[in-house]
Image: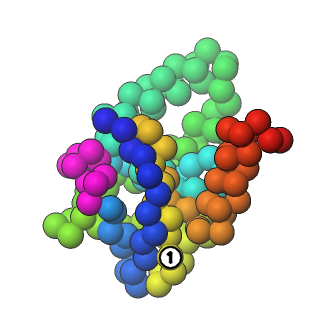
Amino acid sequence: MLFVGAYERQLDDKGRLALPATFRDRIGEHCYLAKGLDKCVTVVPAATFEAEAELLAARVRNGEVSRNQLRALASSAILASLDKQGRVIVDEQLRAYADLHPGAPVTVAGSFDRLELWAPERFQTVNVEGTGDLAGVT
């Protein structure tokens, strides 16, 4: 189960985002939305997120990761479900973190085991940097 590709969508006035049809079945009945790396919002299938949460908690107990990082992730996470139109509600706090605005475009990008929701300009920047890294241009 891989999430690949990038799609342009629009956040509606109620903060709902229709996920691309190709991703909906892979997300499953429930998913978690949380702060992601580089100021995106991650959308993670529930089983994947819960397994990662257990690993992160263990890493905190072993002193490998700070408790503050665990707190930041846990406090930002929201358990969500897709509605019948395949939409998910993106919480106001998460929208602010990723600079996503109602009525504005959003890039929905696959990241193998999760989706990432990006402000298009920010996605363009990280995508160009990543493409340079792949091409050996740094």
Among the 4 quarters of the image, the one containing residue 99: bottom right
Q: Which residue is mark 1?
A: 105
Among the 4 quarters of the image, the one containing residue 11: bottom left
Residue 126 falls inside the magenta stretch: no
Q: Is residue 65 above or below residue 98?
A: above
Q: How is the image coloured?
A: rainbow
Give the residue displayed 24% in from the left and 64% down from the top: 86
Give the dominant element type of the magenta stretch: helix, strand or loop. Answer: helix
Which quadrant of the rendered structure holds the N terminus?
top left
Instruction: State left or right for residue 63 relative to residue 117.
Output: right
Residue 23 falls inside the magenta stretch: yes
Instruction: State left or right for residue 48 relative to residue 101.
Output: left
Asked if one can make out residue 77 in the rendered structure from this viewpoint, the answer is no
- In the displayed orientation, state which residue is furthest to the left: 84
Q: Secondary structure at mark 1?
A: strand
Give the residue displayed 65% in from the left and 69% down from the top: 121
Which quadrant of the rendered structure holds the C terminus?
top right
Q: Is residue 64 above or below residue 124?
A: above
Question: Which sits in the foreground, 115 or 135?
Answer: 135
